[in-house]
Image: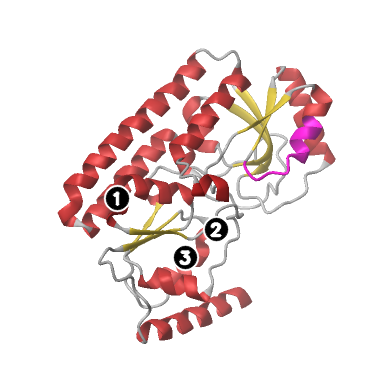
């Protein structure tokens, strides 16, 4: 309740700032703000330099539990298109968009895909009595990435009607690359010796695994706020690696890898990274790394894990 009151007060201050005239770019291009990396890169592929594109998450930062600053809320309320994920971790967006009296142009990724709830898989550490939440990580499935690109193309075309043909050509070319990526993932699974994977981490890959027919075990749900994993959970995952004779265990980006190393030491398996594309390192961001680049890395590590 205190957090909501504080947010309402911040929104009121932002509106005062906007009433006085928030700063705008002077290049005549509309401003598109994206909360995290996947939609930032999708918009970049579709619109190119036709928009002023901003990613709210700082490269290398943890995006769960993000709270916008006053200046960031001002930017959002004054932008031409706001793209966010939606779901429980973006509740602050609902407050910002719907409780300030402004009609904002916004797109949520979860509205562009068919969603499922997070599930508490066997052995996963979590609170079974909690009400299931929508799994927000829709972009991890290449099929969903295509749907998202289509939805964003519609939103960008409405924003820049004179550029519609060019942006749809960009989107069509990009979707062909996503289709090729998707085909390559399915080809890996067609030849796979195994269909079970183990994650020594939070698990943001429900859509990815569902699409590819992968069974999984994991330490924590995808949006878990837990920082410590119990010994019983680690022991359960060690047993799964041994019983399934898995060649490796997965960790995710920005992880310290402690749990994965413990499992690897106990079983003799390798440690592979599967990048959720939530965010990228500063080095990758500055180098212009893309969603496709990250997913191609995932493709190579998946090959190792299922063969």
Disc 1 on helix, strand or loop?
helix
Is 260 inside the magenta-drawn segment? yes
* Contact flag, marks 1 and 3 (Cβ < 8 Å): no
> Residue 49, how many percent across, how many down?
30, 53
If you read the primary sequence from the N terminus, does the residue marked by circle 1 or circle 3 appear first?
1
> Residue 227, how many percent across, how many down?
74, 51
If you read the primary sequence from the N terminus, does the residue marked by circle 3 or circle 2 appear first?
2
Badge count: 3
Disc 2 on helix, strand or loop?
loop
> Residue 63, how many percent across, how many down?
57, 55
Residue beneath the point at 59% across and 13% down? 193
- The residue indicated by pointer 2 is 58
Q: Looking at the picture, does residue 270 appear above or below residue 144? A: above
- Whether residue 68 appears in this view of the structure is yes
Is 262 inside the magenta-drawn segment? yes
Question: Which disc is residue 93 wearing?
Answer: 3
The residues colored magenta run: 253-263
């Amino acid at each position: 309740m205190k957090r909501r009151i504080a947010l309402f007060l911040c929104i009121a201050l932002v509106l005062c700032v906007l009433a006085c005239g928030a700063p705008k770019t002077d290049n005549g291009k509309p401003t598109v703000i994206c909360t995290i990396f996947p939609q930032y890169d999708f918009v970049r592929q579709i619109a190119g330099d036709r928009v002023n594109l901003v990613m709210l998450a700082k490269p290398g930062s943890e995006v769960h539990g993000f709270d916008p600053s006053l200046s960031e809320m001002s930017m959002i309320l004054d932008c031409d298109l706001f793209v966010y994920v939606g779901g429980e971790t973006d509740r602050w967006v609902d407050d910002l968009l719907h409780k300030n009296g402004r009609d904002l142009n916004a797109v949520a990724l979860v509205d562009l895909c068919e969603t499922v709830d997070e599930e508490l898989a066997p052995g996963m550490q979590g609170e079974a009595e909690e009400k299931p939440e929508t799994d927000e990580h829709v972009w991890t499935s290449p099929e969903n990435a295509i749907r998202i690109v289509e939805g964003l193309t519609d939103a960008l075309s409405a924003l820049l009607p004179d550029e519609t043909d060019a942006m749809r050509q960009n989107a069509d070319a990009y979707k062909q690359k996503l289709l090729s990526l998707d085909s390559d993932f399915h080809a890996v699974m067609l030849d796979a010796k195994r269909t079970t994977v183990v994650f020594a981490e939070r698990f943001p890959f429900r859509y990815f695994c569902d699409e590819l027919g992968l069974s999984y075990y994991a330490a924590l749900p995808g949006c878990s706020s837990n920082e410590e994993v119990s010994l019983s959970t680690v022991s359960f995952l060690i047993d799964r690696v041994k019983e399934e004779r898995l060649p490796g265990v997965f960790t995710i980006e920005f992880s310290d890898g402690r749990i994965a190393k413990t499992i690897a030491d106990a079983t003799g398996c390798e440690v592979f990274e599967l990048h959720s594309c939530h965010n990228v390192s500063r080095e990758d961001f500055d180098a212009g790394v893309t969603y496709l680049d990250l997913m191609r890395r995932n493709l190579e590590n998946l090959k190792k894990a299922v063969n």
